[in-house]
Image (cartoon, rainbow, N blue to C red):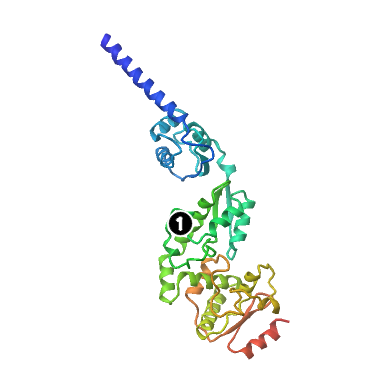
Amino acid sequence: MRYVYAIIGGFIIVVGIAVGWMLLSVNHATGSASQQVSFTVARGQQLRSVAVALQKDNLISSAGAWTLYALTQGKRSGILVGDYVLDRGMTGRQILQTISTQNAKDNEVMLTFKEGLTNKEIASSLETAGVVSASDFLAAVGVTDSRTVVAKDYTFLADKPASADLEGYLFPDTYRFFKKSTAASVLQKFLDNFDQRVTPALRQAAKAHGHTLYEELTMASILEKELKTDTDRANGADVFWKRIDIGMPLQSDATVIFSTGQSNINVSIADTNTDSPYNTYQHKGLPPGPINNPGISSLRAAINPTSNPYYYYLTAPDGTTYFAKTLAEHNENKAKYLK
């Protein structure tokens, strides 16, 4: 009997030590409240995996103790998917409370970004929806090396000029975000989607045509604003590439509008005289970079233009595009359709 009591007593001591270790750990903060850390719980991520990630980010001192505590609180499957801003002044207990008690439905936002929006327009929508401040997001997309924001090396950025920002790479689509996300987590969603949607086959096709993906994105961004249908974009792409080949200015109104920062669609003579590298009336070749974030159809048109005999086109007020082989024919179209 004494032997049995000894075993029970020993077990109680061990349990007591384990509970004490667990409570000591989860009531401990690893740093100060001024040390903020962005933390993401991915969909399908298991409790133990979350604990390991928290310890790796030095937010908790022991993944084992934190996991054990979470289990004692009935949180085996109670961790909410989302992006969080935690700080090292929080205890493990407070962190568990934070990532398991938010109302996920109220915290989630679905946003659709149409083709042709600029980074500034996307940032404004994100701020209005409460996802991230426009200034923080623009700071993230304005960097020349995304790895300083997102700890991931995207191969499709390899041919992006060293001085260029990420205009053109925020893929138009419908996204789910969490309110009060970090700029880094939001940017990564855009770039991950671009990586998936702009396939290796498309990237190889761009290279086969003698252009970098960045050049194709720049062309696609012009087509996105200038032309309305896939057929017109493919024809327009051939017009623009031929103009570049013969040293003829693109004379794109869309690039002038981008250079002036205006939102109107009527470009004046004064506008075309604006001193800007994006003014393709004044400068031959492509502008320095994309003027918006184009969709996949425009990118495909840029990469695979439809061969044609045209060098000019105009878009009538009703949206119809009229192509012309010569300047004289183009002027006739202007007189006829731009009354």
Whole-percent x and y of residue 333? Answer: 66, 85
Quadrant location, the N terminus: top left
Whole-percent x and y of residue 47? Answer: 42, 38
Quadrant location, the C terminus: bottom right
Q: From the viewer's perspective, is 152 left or right of 265?
A: left
Amino acid marked by disc 1: Arg
Residue at 59%, 77% in the rendered image:
280
Provide the residue designation for mark 1: 147
Location of residue 211 with respect to 87 vertically, above or below: below
Residue 314 is drawn in which quadrant?
bottom right
Q: Residue furthest bottom?
A: 328
Whole-percent x and y of residue 18? Answer: 37, 24
Residue at 44%, 34% in the rendered image:
76
Location of residue 146 with respect to 204 vertically, above or below: above
Q: Quick one: 20 or 162, which is closer to the camera?
A: 162
Q: Quick one: 14 or 147, which is closer to the camera?
A: 147
Q: From the viewer's perspective, is 25 left or right of 263?
A: left
